[in-house]
Image (tube, rainbow, N blue to C red):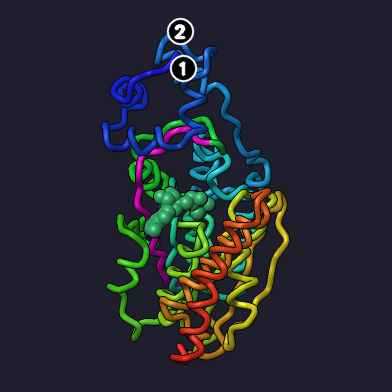
Amino acid sequence: MRMSVAEFAQCLRLDRHQALKATRKRSLYSLIAADELAPSLVAARQLLEGRAKCWDPTLLNQFKEPWAAALRKLYATPVAYPASLPPSQGLQLRNLVLDRNVRSCVEIGCFIGVSSLWIGSAIRENGDGYLRSVDLFEPKAPNRFHFSFLDDPYEAAAKAVRDAGLHGIIEFVRSESTTYAAQLDAAEPLDMVFIDGDHTFLGIARDFLAYFPLLRKGGVAVLHDIHPAYCGWTGPRKFLDRYLSACPNVRVTEIETQPNFGIAVVEKTGDELLPLSWPRLLCLQAEVAAAALARRATDSAPARMLRSNVVLPLKAFLRRSHK
Ligand SMILES: C[S@@+](CC[C@H](N)C(=O)[O-])C[C@H]1O[C@@H](n2cnc3c(N)ncnc32)[C@H](O)[C@@H]1O
């Protein structure tokens, strides 16, 4: 059975525009349209939710504070899997914040606030400080990674912070990440930015370039999901290998995690970055696309065309203009 966009929207409690966006994700549409989910739309939703898994929160038992209890509750909501940091990585992030005595932090992509509580709990232990967590806070419908629904991530995150007693430390900002960066004052530098929002190459590049000038020297940008084979995102890895590896004034440490989404800690050692003008960014992206095409396509012509018509002319332009 196939369903109309209006029916689909009703089922997911999305508006028509959001539903249209979601139906463009083929995996979601085919899942909803699958025969086993046909009997009724409500049954389909229940069935999807019934498939949800959860992270194992046992590791939190060592903590008795309210923030740990609030985290346990968040981990019990199916939508936390796998989008939110697993407990083992949350602990690694918390230890990083403690070790580096982080007091001022921006987090890009907090979803329902799991990583926010891990970071915020450590900032409070460090003394006075703040975490500003910026997110689009859009409703979540099932995709190829998870089967659960959430209408209002902002409300879930805000409630968790209240339960955790961390409302004096954590502030949520509903905004696009780079729009928010433009409002921040470089005169009040950040100790850390945790980047876990838009995981495409361009998304990571935009976030990194927007927030690097806001970091103090010795501060760190922390990238999540650096192992594409595990997390399915290629952006962070490509940004590390193609840009940061050639960049002055950064010291990169990769931390292995269990499960192996991976974390990279990028320490700022100076102000200048490898110039990344828009033509260079476009060039990098075209190279990434050409490499992906070459890997996937049986016919090498599209990759060759992309290289000769986009990558090489852009490189020639960059050489001529020294951008
Ligand atoms: C993987 S989830 C974050 C999980 C969270 N860090 C945790 O571990 O609990 C990614 C989040 O990034 C947000 N996001 C994606 N692109 C964004 C952007 N350009 N600006 C702000 N938030 C963004 C999404 O809305 C989503 O909630």
One can see residue 144 in this view: yes
Using the image, tell me which numbered label, if any, was put on residue 39: 2
The Cα–Cα distance between marks 1 and 2, rounded to whole angstroms, is: 8 Å
Identify the residue shown where x is 42% and y is 82%. Answer: 213
Identify the residue shown where x is 54% and y is 35%. Answer: 146
Where's the C terminus, which quadrant? Answer: bottom left
- Relative to 82, residue 261 above or below: below
**Mark 1 touches mark 2? (CB < 8 Å):** yes
Tell me the magenta residue range.
Answer: 126-143
Image side of residue 301 versus residue 126, left or right: right
Using the image, tell me which numbered label, if any, was put on residue 158: none
Residue 102 sits inside the magenta stretch: no
Residue type, mark 2 in image: Pro
- Residue 81 drawn at (x, y percent): 56, 39
Q: Which residue is mark 1?
A: 44
The total number of labels drawn is 2
